[in-house]
Amino acid sequence: MTPDSERRLGTDTSASSAGGGSLFAYAEGNARIYQAMGDMTVIARPGAPEGPAVVPVAVQVDEEAVFVGRGEQIEELLTVFGEPRDAGAVVVSAGMGGVGKTALVTRAAARAVEQGQVSSAVVLNLNGYDPDAAQRAKPRDVLGPLLRVLGMADEDVPITVPEQLTAYHALLDGWQQQGRRLLLVLDNAADAGQVTALLPPAPHSAAVTTRDTLTLPGRTHRLDLDTLPMTDAVDLLTQLLQRNALEDPRAGEGAALVRLADLCGCLPLALEIVAAVLADEPSMTVAELADELEQAPQSLESLRRADRSVAAVLELSWHRLTERDAAAAELLSLLPLNPGPDLSTAVAAALAGIADAQVKPRLRALRHAHLLRQAGGRWRMHDLVRQHARSRLNDKHRVPALRRVLEHYDRTADAANDHLRALLGTSVPDTFPGRAEALAWFDTERANLTSAVALALDTGHHDVTTHLAIALVWYLTWRRHLSDLVTVSEHALAAAQYCNLPRTLAIAWSDFGVALHEVRRFEEAIAAQEQAAAIFREIGDRQGKGRALINLGNALQGVWRFEEAIAAQEQAAAIYRETGDRHREGIALNNLGNALQGVWRFEEAIAAHEQAAAIYRETGDRHGEGGALNNLGNALREVRRFEEAIAAHEQAAAIYRETGDRHGEGRALNNFGLVLREVRRFEEAIAAHEQAAAIYRETGDRHGEGGALNNLGLVLEEVRRFEEAIAAHEQAAAIYRDFGDRQGEGTALNNLGLALGEVRRFEEAIAAHEQAAAIYRDFGDRQGEGRALINLGNALQDVRRFDEAIAAQEQAAAIFRETGDRQGEGRALNNLGNALRQVRRFDEAIAAHEQAAAIYRETGDRHGEGGALNNLGLALRQVRRFDEAIAAQEQAAAIFRQTGDRHREGTALNNLGNAFEDAGRLEEATDAWATAVSAFEEAGDPGLRSNCDRKARHIAAEPGVSTAPVAD
């Protein structure tokens, strides 16, 4: 017997929200088929910055850089790197800032690769001494990029830190088996917490550079790096001078060079800066520069000698810069105002209040003076230089420059946001050539932009805080930077509350509510949207009220308050219809369709999604059209219009691909897999769910990955890959458990129980269904509890605990009757009939199946009606009412033929053949089985095909021998 099992499929709906004047798409999860399933994106820590962008690089040595001395230290490092392969090593190179730790270790690492001591060397700059603590990298910031650099495909990189660490160690174990060794250079580490988790196991090695004393696990070799010996310091100065002018006569000023090196504390950073000063002034002698250095401020005497040398050199460099290029010196003092780790030329121009063309010579002058570095078109300064430059800035210049840079970020973000949101035919600013460039700018500037919102709030620029935060909403949602989204929305709300401007405050509440929704804080999201709607209502802003109602409806769906969600979306649609805003009317209709699906009003949902898609098409919103089509496909699947559903999901996936929305593409593929499963295209369904899971993993949506894995498990069961199905459901349950999504966990456990039953692990299956029922009961989800009870009853039948099975199905039927879920009641009654048949309570079984068939007929569920009739036929045979059994099986076969389900048509025909045989109508029995063979063959089910074929041949050979039924 194959029971009418309750399998929950996780459908990804595409809801649209309106917030702060910005319209953007996001994933809001409601499951379809038998229950809604949540959809969420992983967050590192709500309200916390996501950390700096850290890019690991393969070790490269700048052949043009001047490097002298340190031969003994390089040999020491090479000796440690080359130690036996069963003894991985950690080398800590400690020394003050500017002493040359990075240059030494990277040069030694390059030598180690050249000599074959290690296979690869990778450098990670941990920014441990950046004045901005937010820019100091932690393991969570670097593990993902590191795995990619080490060769792991993007789609295989896990999301959570524990999983990334596991993958990191597994990857390095694989390297070891291949005879490969890694040398990992962890540069600029301020504390052990930045590096401990990253240290590779033996036989791999690590080199850590730091200014402090670090206590690290394992075998640690410490290399304390001091300033250069005098001879090497003079050699460095000499080579630097000769690099700029080979015949520079000052290279021969031996005594003066010694004196200058001594004044620099023999520190490489200081020596490079004074050499740059001399290069800028060919007529200045080394002795004259030394004289200037000796006149450094007395306050420097309180510093250590080496620190004093750096400060003195920086002070001298600053002084000479002010004399020779005052504009460049002023720019240097302004650059630390930039809130992020690096900056563009345009930002430097904004800080100075001049054009890009004017600021470029000043930036080049600072780079020439070794006070600024350039890489990849971005400008960055050493943290020691940053600290010194910050001390030279006065309030007279600070206040206007800060306002200018904040306004620059605000203005440019606004223009980029216009490109991201633009509908077909809409005019956009010429700041960017197109949408792709605008998105790339956001990606590059994200750390600066999110920090700028916080800086604007801290410094009282509340107007910029709110406006810049609004401009970031679409982008942060699109890229799934959800903790950043929550943070900037919180900042915007705080600024709006300070300003107390009603409309600004309402927008801030609404955007904050959307951010809360994205991280599944639904109750708080509802409260925020209600606040926004109340303010909009009070000031008579109909458009604003409509936006808040859309977002409120979405949040209400998150807690299953579907009737209220429907009312909110209907109000929003009416407002936009009244005000003539077609585009937002489409958004409201699309979300209305999602809410209608939540209460099984699928025909109305189809109409709403079709209207929404038409409006999106009319207004040129391709992305919105994709979302509407994706949701339309979900509703079409529910009414078994599978081919139309397939077309809708394929179109949606293509549109998301076209518009560059990877997360949306994942949603469409996940739903595409569900409908492919319905038409028994199982291999394609598996591929779709696997792609969806990979995309969710890639975009950081761990919760969405759980939904895709859950659906993958269901289709793996269909092809009898049960162990893989069990693994998929277990992973999904673990993901939901991690996020505290009890409903999702219940869903995964319920489906896990089905897979366990297939491999006859019945007791575990029963436990899984019992856990699922308990979770639903605790959560107050009566329908979910009913679904779990149906599956529990079926599992109890498998271990012949029939009385308990009957009780479970009766409870399920009662729950569905109580909640008004007629379809659920029909399923429970159908399964109840199966259980009653097992204890030979045939009349009650017949009554249950007849009631189930009537309910399915009433609700228009032809497929369900076919299943109930099929089982009814089995019960009628048991009491030898063969003619009625034959009629029921014939009706069942006809229904399955009409709905295109060849597999179940074959099942009904097989049972019809059995009924004919019992009635002594053997020729008709043979014909029925032969037709069943064709149906099973077409459905790709060779096992049942051969079974029917064997029975047909057996009857032909030995008439009158009874055969066993194959029940549905």
Image (cartoon, grey):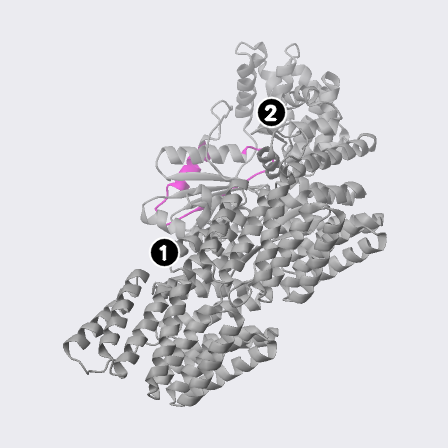
CA gap, disc 2 and disc 1: 66 Å
**Residue at x 67% of width, y 52% of height:** 486
State the residue in front, 784 or 589: 589
**Residue at x 47% of width, y 29% of height:** 61
Q: Which residue is mark 1?
A: 683
Position of residue 498 relative to residue 66, above or below, is below
Q: Which residue is mark 2?
A: 271
Q: Is residue 834 left or right of residue 854?
A: left
10 Å crowding of disc 1: few (<14), some (14-19), many (20+): some
- What's under tag 1, amino acid-wise? Glu
Pointer 2 or 1: first along the chain? 2
10 Å crowding of disc 2: few (<14), some (14-19), many (20+): many
Q: Position of residue 105 (x, y in %)?
A: 48, 36
Position of residue 643 relative to residue 184, above or below, is below
Position of residue 736 relative to residue 961, above or below, is above
Magenta span of residues: 72-100
Q: Position of residue 897 (x, y in %)?
A: 38, 65
Point out the frontmost of discs 2 and 1: 1
Residue at the farthest left position? 957
- What's under tag 2, amino acid-wise? Leu
